[in-house]
Each structure stands twice: as C-alpha cells, then as structure tokens.
Image: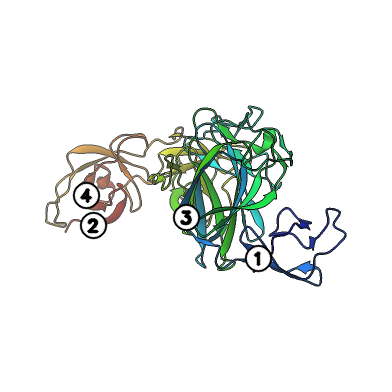
Amino acid sequence: MGVLGTYCFDGLNFSQASSLYTDSTLSVLAADGFYSQGGVVRQQSNGVLLAAQACGNCSVPCGNGISVSLSQNGFFDINFDVGNTLGAVVAYFYMGGSIADGVIANFNSVNYNRLTAQGNDGTTLVDGSGTAVDYSGIGNQGTGDPTYVGSDTANIIRAYTNTSVTPGVCNTGDAPENYSYAGSSYVAQGTLNPLTVTNTMCGRALSGSPVFTMVIPKTSASPTFLNLKISAPACGTFFAYELDCPAGLSSFGSSVAQSTTACAVNTQTYYFAKNATGTNVPFTVDTNTIPNVGNFVFTDANGATYLNDTATIQYYITGNTTAIGVRNGVVVSSAACAGGGTNNSPFFATAGTTTLNDGTCGNATGSLLYHDGTGTLPQVGDTIYAGSTTGSQTVSWSNYRGMGPADVADGVVDTAIVNSSGVIQTIYSCP
C-alpha cells in the first residue's frame, strides 16, 4: 500500500511534470518508483517521470454526473475513463447560485478551461473586472489555471495562501485542501493547495448562474483517461457537473464565412455543441438543430478546431434563411439573413397529387411560389418558398404540378417532389 508524502514537481500539474523532487528548490530528486496524485499514476525512472496513466480503480466511467456541497473549501481532482471512441467530450457545470467555482480539464497533456452558456451573446458573461467576454476563460488560455464560473466571482478574487488551517474550520483566505475522487466520493488528501484567483481567471454570468459548457476533443483512441479539477476556494460551496462520453457533434449546413448577413446557399458543413439547463445532474440538454446564441461551433465533429476563433465577427448563412454571427468560436448573434436574399423568378404551381405522371398536363394554375435557385426554372436542390424573401415560410406541400408560366421556356409541364424542408428532390415531366 502506498504511503502519503509531500513532493514537488516542475510542471503545471502532476500529469505534465517531468520530474518529482523532495524539496521546494527542485534540487533533490525523489526516489525512483511509482507515484500517484488525484488518480494519476506515474513512474519515476532515473529521475524522469514516465507517461501518466489512470489509476485503474480510481477512474469514473464517462456519462456520469457528480454533485458536491460542503462547508469547507477544496481543490477537487477526478479522473474519467473516456474509452477509446473518438469524438467530442462535452462537459456541463452548474456552480450554484452564490459562489463561483473554477474548472479545468486535462486530456492528453492539453489543458481545457474555456466555457460558454445558453444565451451567451458576447455581453452576458464578464470577467472579474466586469469586462464583457465572448466566453469564460478568454483571458485565461495557456495558463493552466481553472476558469471560475457561476453567478458571482467578486467574492473569490483574492489570494488563498494561509496554510495555518484548523481542521474543520474554514476562514477566508485559507488554502484549499486537496481532494481526490475514489470509489464514490471525494477523499481529503491531507495536503493544501495555495492559490490566487485573478480577474482574468473569471467568467461569470451577469444575472443568475447558467449551466456552463466545455468541449474536450478526443481525436485518437488513446489515452483513455481525462483529468478534471474543480477549484472551490471560498468557504461553503456547491457544484454539480456531468461529463458525457465522446461522440460526434451535431452538424449544420452553412455558407462560407462572410462579412455581411446577405443570404447565401449552403456549401459547407460545420458542427456545434449544445448547451444545457438545470441546477443538478442530469442536466437537460438543448434540442436545437442549428446553432443558437451561446453555442460553441467547430469545423470538425470532434470539436478540435473552433470556427472563426478570432475577435472579428463572421457570418455563416444556414438554410439560406438565418445569419449566424460567430466570434471567438461562439455564436453571438442569430437573425434572418438579408440583402441579396430575394428569391428568384416566381412560378405558378398547384398542389400535387400522390400519383405522378397521371396524365394531368394542363397549364399550371394555383399558388404563386418562389425558389432560391439561380435559374429561371426551379431545379433539383432548390428550396421552395411561399414568398419572395428567404425569410418567408417554406411551402409544406409534398409535390407540385405545373411549374409555369416559366414552363413555356421548355414547353413541358413538370411535377416536382420536395422533402420536408421544401427542397426539390426530383423533377418529372408529364407524359
């Protein structure tokens, strides 16, 4: 059985350190052997730490949620087994209604600490100084520090360096005690973790405390463990989180990036992570089929590359109807596209029958409809609309007969079948 001891390392965390030492000046190497912290096991050989591994009895299967409420403060460490499936690991966090807590994930030696929330439009989340941010942790990238989220962060921005801690008593400024998840609960490790929370490490909501979303890409079969840390430096806190297993993100069709909201047809496929609501696990995940304001968006299904991860807003037109504004990888606006989006030449059509080519080949009469193609006549792939703008309702008929009077151009009265989104799938000519 292992023996609890105090050691120092030369990295941001134990998973990334290169060597372990017995003194704070990093001059005396620890003895070769196996060491563990927070469910991470590493072997030191010839003074060098080998690859990090998950403690087989300490990892929690992905797809689980955990809730913690305590009167103390703490630094809570847990390992999740995310298996060998590829995809995006999506995690959701609710940090309570009064005290913010920090979160950082480490996977494959990369730290992840950027979060968004439902309705986050670039003005609803602020850092510790009150400056609006497009996502929580925007000023905290590359630091290896947790990002603190919740309804308020003003009460946690300070140093937590007092190591004269009385067991069972929590005073403001006390260094949090380290906890590791083992079995079914967090277990105190008997060591302290002094830290300082700064403005740039914060990203709270202006009003209330939403559920925050984090995306960790898993692009290879191994490694299979993911380390998650919750920093709760204030005395008395509550937090709840769940970490889903890797899966491909939802996709949506879009135009290429453009600087205006002018309507445009879909030529690209992008991906987004859905947000969630609730105050405890399991959270209720949104069901939107195209990105909403506050969603992280990506160029790949694994969530490895954020779409337009720059401070300059770009617009992506989906369905030739909706202009989605993206900045720093987050949807910050969504509205009907405009300017250059007028549908093409009108055509007459009558509601079709369930039998095609039934010999009814007279002139087209009935409703005046529109299409968004480039030609005079509707073509396969065009979307049918009831009005002359792309914001008009798509007609719900299953097929159409008599696409005239433009049919005079080819002398044929046609019949078209469309899908549930109003997109023409097939065009038949009457016999």
Tell me if residue 22 comes above or below residue 273 in the rendering.
Answer: below
State which mark lies toward you, 3 or 1. 1
Q: Secondary structure at mark 4?
A: loop
Give the residue pinned by disc 4.
398
Measured in 3D between alpha carbons, the distance from the residue under mark 1 to the one under mark 4, in whole angstroms, is 60 Å
Disc 4 residue type?
A: Ser
Q: Secondary structure at mark 1?
A: strand
Closer-to-camera residue (124/312) = 124
State the separation of the CA atoms marked 4 and 3: 39 Å
Picture coordinates of residue 193 (x, y %)?
70, 47
Q: Amino acid at mark 2?
A: Tyr
Q: Earlier in the sequence, mark 2 or mark 4?
A: 4
Earlier in the chain: of badge 3 and badge 1, it is: 1
Q: CA distance from mark 2 to mark 4?
A: 14 Å
**Gap between marks 3 and 1, in whole Å?**
23 Å
Pointer 1 residue: 41
At label 1, the amino acid type is: Val
Q: Could you say which quadrant of the image residue 45 lies in?
A: bottom right
Q: Which residue is mark 2?
A: 428
235 left or right of 174 in image: left
Look at the image and tell me whether residue 136 can be seen.
no
Q: Are marks 2 and 4 in contact (CB under 8 Å)?
A: no
Residue 130 or residue 294, whichever sits in front: 130
* Whole-number angstrom distance, CA of label 2 to CA of label 3: 47 Å
The residue closer to the viewer here, 248 or 145, is 145
Q: Residues within 10 Å of mark 3 (few under 14, many from 20)?
A: some
Label 3 sits on residue: 244
Residue kind at label 3, given as amino acid type: Asp
- Left or right, 313 with respect to 404, comes to right
**Which of the marked residues, 1 or 4, is nearer the chain's N terminus?**
1
